[in-house]
Image (cartoon, rainbow, N blue to C red):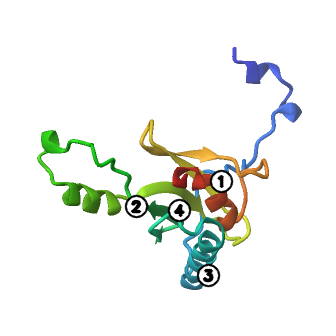
Amino acid sequence: MTSASVLPKELIMRGWVNDPHSGGVKIPEQVKQRTKHRILTYAEQHYAGKYIRIEVRFKGYFCYIDAYKEPFLPDSYDLSMFKITRSEYIERAKNTPIHLCRLRYKGNEEKWTKAFYTYSNEKYEPSLFNNGTFYGTPSEAFQSSALYLD
């Protein structure tokens, strides 16, 4: 006997559950353009000088935000074991993205969900916005994911 069979029929609730981190709506082209502009403008206003460039890309109902930074390499660092020159290392590092976050579009430009990229697991993990909910704007997502820029 299962625990569900012990409950009276009227107490067993069935219905749809809203999972903020599943599904989504394909992002219309105009929403993509506005979202990209919004993210780049926010980054420039609040994080200028902390990155070389920000890349915003879209796939299906996802929006990915990546940053590129000027690499730090001390003059005394020996690269001979990697069989690469200093300039080759710097060029490669400049072109390696720092994944900030992935946004999921649910049909409302003011209520996206966010997954933070965890380098320890090398995957996107659902996360809250700084407002304490699973929903926020692209600017709020950038702001809460920008710790990789420090």
Quadrant housing residue 71: bottom left
- Dot 2 amino acid type: Glu
Secondary structure beneath disc 1? helix
Where residue 72 appears, x then y in whole percent? 38, 52
Give the alpha-carbon distance from disc 1 to disc 4, as whole Å: 15 Å
Callout 3: few (<14), some (14-19), or many (20+) C-alpha neighbours within 10 Å? few
* Residue 50: assigned label: 4
Q: Mark 1 = which residue?
A: 144
* Residue 70: assigned label: 2
Which residue is more in the foreground, 92 or 130?
92
Question: Does the CB distance between marks 2 and 3 fall below 8 Å?
Answer: no
Q: Is residue 45 visible?
A: yes
Callout 2: few (<14), some (14-19), or many (20+) C-alpha neighbours within 10 Å? some
Question: Does the CB distance between marks 1 and 4 fall below 8 Å?
Answer: no
Camera-near label (4 vs 3) is 4
Which residue is more in the foreground, 69 or 108?
69
Residue 133 vertical placement versus 111 (above, below): above
User: Which residue is pictured at 55% across the width and 71% down the height?
Assistant: 26
Callout 4: few (<14), some (14-19), or many (20+) C-alpha neighbours within 10 Å? some
The answer to which of marks 1 and 4 sits earlier in the sequence is 4
Furthest-left residue in view? 83
The answer to which of marks 1 and 3 sits earlier in the sequence is 3
Quadrant housing residue 91: bottom left
Where residue 63 appears, x then y in whole percent? 53, 66
Which residue is more in the foreground, 11 or 143?
143
